[in-house]
């Protein structure tokens, strides 16, 4: 049975896309050290991401951009990113295991939601790692264009530093205007 693990990164941040990954691991090539991406160091995540890409039977990334998040809401954008990741797989799974308590409505797939799956299901852990490595790299790149916001450090999350930068400099085109802290800054500036 081919099992795909799916997870997303970036539901909570005030800026940047939400990125999902789908991974089908090869049972003949186990990967040691898979875990919830948040419990690993950045260096370890990057090492594991290389190993996952090399050893997995299939892997794919999907994303929903800021405009899509603002248009359809973060939950629906997360489901859209997951759908895109699944559809991008070179082979299709028999079962999809998703981290969390809800699955997107995709009749083509048999799905199972697993709370805490990113720490307990290898396929979901692998997806979590791939998605986080990609999204973090994007925010580090964004930091080069907008260094005053500190994206490389907080990855778009609503830290005190980020909120202060929003107050001082306003929102970038990469900020999610549907999120309250960003919306408040925009409304205050009008």
Image: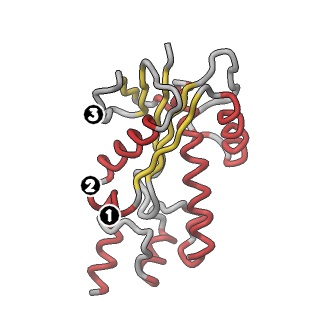
Say which of marks 1 and 3 sits in front.
3
Residue 90 position, x and y percent, is 53, 31
Residue 175 position, x and y percent, is 41, 68
Question: Within 10 angstroms of label 2, few (less than 14), some, or many (20 or more) residues?
Answer: few
Q: Which residue is mark 3?
A: 105
Q: Which residue is mark 1?
A: 179
Residue 108 position, x and y percent, is 32, 26
Q: Would you say the residues marked 2 and 3 are in contact, meaning their CB atoms lie under 8 Å apart? A: no
Residues at marks 1 and 3, CA–CA distance in whole angstroms = 24 Å
Residues at marks 2 and 3, CA–CA distance in whole angstroms = 15 Å
For the view shown, which residue lies furthest in the front direction? 90
The residue lying at 62 percent from left, 57 percent from top is: 137
Question: Within 10 angstroms of label 3, few (less than 14), some, or many (20 or more) residues?
Answer: few
Toward the viewer: 190 or 71?
Answer: 71
Secondary structure at badge 3 equals loop
Q: Which residue is mark 2?
A: 72
Question: Within 10 angstroms of label 1, few (less than 14), some, or many (20 or more) residues?
Answer: some
């Amino acid at each position: 049975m081919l099992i795909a693990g799916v997870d997303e990164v970036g539901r909570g941040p005030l800026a940047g896309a939400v990125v999902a990954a789908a991974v089908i691991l090869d049972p003949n090539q186990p990967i040691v050290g898979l875990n919830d991406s948040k419990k690993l160091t950045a260096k370890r995540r990057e090492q594991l991401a290389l190993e996952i890409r090399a050893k997995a039977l299939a892997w794919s990334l999907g994303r929903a951009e800021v405009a899509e998040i603002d248009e359809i809401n973060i939950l629906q954008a997360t489901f859209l990113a997951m759908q895109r990741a699944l559809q991008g797989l070179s082979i299709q799974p028999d079962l999809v295991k998703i981290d969390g308590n809800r699955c997107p409505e995709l009749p083509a797939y048999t799905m199972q939601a697993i709370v805490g799956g990113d720490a307990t299901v290898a396929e979901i852990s692998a997806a979590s790692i791939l998605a986080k490595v990609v999204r973090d790299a994007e925010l580090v790149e964004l930091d080069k264009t907008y260094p005053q916001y500190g994206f490389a450090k907080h990855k778009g999350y609503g830290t005190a530093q980020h909120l202060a930068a929003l107050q001082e400099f306003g929102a970038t085109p990469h900020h999610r205007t549907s999120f309250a802290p960003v919306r408040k800054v925009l409304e205050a500036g009008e």
